[in-house]
Amino acid sequence: MKNYTITVNGNVYDVVVEEGASTGAPAAAPKAAPKAAPKAAPAAAAPAAGGAAGSIKIEAGAAGKVFKVEASVGQAVKKGDTVLVLEAMKMEIPQVAPEDGTVASINVNVGDPVEAGAVLATLN
């Protein structure tokens, strides 16, 4: 038998896989099931954190991970300027300012997982 640690959607599972000749998939399926409760809590609270919120929201266009933050709080941005970059399915997706303004808050950090529609930053 071999022990593995597997992470699925931010949840960590310890699994045991039995080696050897198998008579069918149903016998092997229970061995691969998680034997412990998830060790890591989903990072759903991370997008809600941040400084003072502005009135203009920059929301995630897709679920992914924060790859890069290119603007900082207090920085003036023009419509179309990249505020941060998400990574989803090996693609970098710029999240841009919907209009001219000043960055009021950055609500995520590099490496944070985000869901589609999550508020990533705000502008005034």
Image (spheres, grey):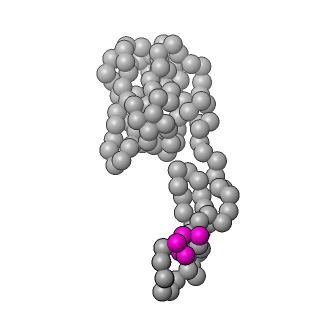
- Residue visible at 45% across and 26% down in the picture: 59
108 falls in the magenta region: no
Rendered-image quadrant of the N terminus: bottom right
Q: Is residue 114 left or right of residue 12?
A: left
- Residue 75 coordinates in the image, percent (x, y): 44, 21
- Residue visible at 33% across and 17% down in the picture: 79
- Residue 117 coordinates in the image, percent (x, y): 47, 29
Q: Is residue 80 left or right of residue 54?
A: left
Q: Which residues are magenta?
A: 26-30
- Residue 39 coordinates in the image, percent (x, y): 66, 56
28 falls in the magenta region: yes
Q: Is residue 86 above or below residue 81?
A: below
Q: How many marks?
A: 0
Residue 72 visible to the viewer: no
Q: Nearer the viewer, residue 59 or 108?
A: 59
- Residue visible at 64% across and 52% down in the picture: 40
Q: Is residue 31 above or below residue 86?
A: below
Q: Is residue 1 above or below residue 63?
A: below
